[in-house]
Image (cartoon, rainbow, N blue to C red):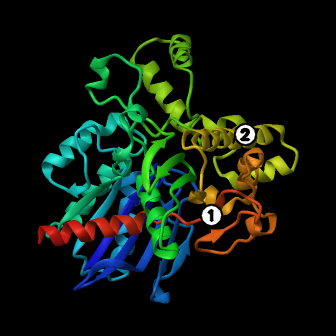
Amino acid sequence: MRILVFNTGSSSIKFSVFESDAETGLTDPRSTIDGELSGIGSENTTLRVRAQDERLTSARSEVSAKSIDEAIGQVFATVYEAQILAIEAVGYRVVHPGPKLNDHQRVTPELLVELEEAIAFAPLHNPQALAVIRAGLARFPDIPHFACFDTIFHRTMPEEATTFALPAEYRERGVRRYGFHGLSCESIVSQMQSQNGNVPKRLVIAHLGSGCSVTALVDGQSVDTTMGLTPTGGVVMGTRPGDLDPGLILYLLRAHESYNKDAVSDLESMLNHNSGMVALSSLSNDMRAVRKAAADGDVRAQLAAKVFTRSVTKAIGGYCWLMGGVDAIVFTGGIGEHDAETRREVLGDLRGIGISIDASLNQTGASGMRQINSSESVTSVFVIPAQEDRMIAVHVDRMARANS
């Protein structure tokens, strides 16, 4: 089975094609092509494509994608240019399914209605995902389409981890902690099982990228995570502030020039696009730019990096206490995988509880799973690439075969 996967972010669209064995299914997915169109809505839109056929591999910076619709058109043109015509199923990453959907499922008109209603839970991500789904349905009308949700992995969290201390009427409407980056966490568990034969009993996964979260797992299942009702909360992120005092939100609303619907919209935009490290550093949300400025003596960039890593350290340290210790810590995501300084700073303040990394191993830029803890560390530390697209393909393969 040939499966086309779309992984839509707030300003990017990743796409991949996986092939599964006709008899055994997608137990060992083979990626034949993957690409990413990034910088949607900016002047620096880039399209990268990697494929088994080197003639299809390219990196173009001259593409234009000032809107999500233009971006979708560019992606589908690339797919057709690669002559990937025999697609048998399509899978989509959707950040938030809302309070009613409890599993990955086939796209139907009814599901689209539910996802429209769930936009309020993830206004930064869900509209783009819906636009891509509708475009996919139009381009491939005769094959099954499936939505995979970032929250599903966290269904195993106990009630005390998901419940907000709010009146029952709001909790009954679905106001609770959902957790995100679930497909990333699931891919880490899958890789550890495949390469090590087992998953450490007490595991913490720090997914650090444009969006950041820290998740605690016991026996490979989520028991707590930093993100909450929406992907805005938790640790500090590139453009999002992480957890805030609820009273601060009220203050910001009252301080707005016009305390009305526009004030809510402006505040939502600020919290999703103009907060986090970009607000502290006055730079882009690219950690490489922040690190360079910090090294050059920019005090704002230095503060931004310290606030970010401190928030991640607090989250990991809290889970160490919650689980009575941690057997392994995994860094993943763009920052987690590629920024050695972040890993060093995050774990530096955890030396007191016996967690330490090997400086030379931490600096190694090797690809794939690698272990970077020192020999004295009581906790294993890994760097493992997130494979969200692979997990989507696995779920789509399973659902498509069950529906055939």
Q: Name above or below for residue 350 compared with residue 39.
A: above
Q: Nearer the viewer, mark 1 or mark 2?
A: 1
Picture quadrant where residue 303 is located: top right
CB atoms of marks 1 and 2 within 8 Å: no
Give the SS element for disc 1: strand
Please state if 249 lies on the left or on the right of 281 as rendered: left
Are there few (<14), some (14-19), or many (20+) residues within 10 Å of tag 2?
many
Work out whether residue 353 can be spotted: yes
Name which residue type carries label 1: Phe
Q: Position of residue 404 (x, y in %)?
A: 11, 72
Picture quadrant where residue 279 is located: top right
Q: Position of residue 181 (x, y in %)?
A: 45, 51
Name which residue type carries label 2: Ala
Q: Name above or below for residue 150 compared with residue 197.
A: above
Please state if 29 lies on the left or on the right of 280 as rendered: left
Q: How many tags in the picture?
A: 2
Picture quadrant where residue 168 is located: top left
- Of mark 1 and mark 2, the one earlier in the sequence is 2
Work out whether residue 290 can be spotted: no
Q: Position of residue 142 (x, y in %)?
A: 13, 70
| Rendered image: mark on residue 269 | none
Q: Which residue is mark 1?
A: 382
Please state if 333 lies on the left or on the right of 5 as rendered: right
Give the SS element for disc 2: helix
Q: Position of residue 194 (x, y in %)?
A: 46, 74
| Rendered image: mark on residue 304 | 2
Please state if 198 lies on the left or on the right of 328 as rendered: left
**Furthest residue toward left:** 404
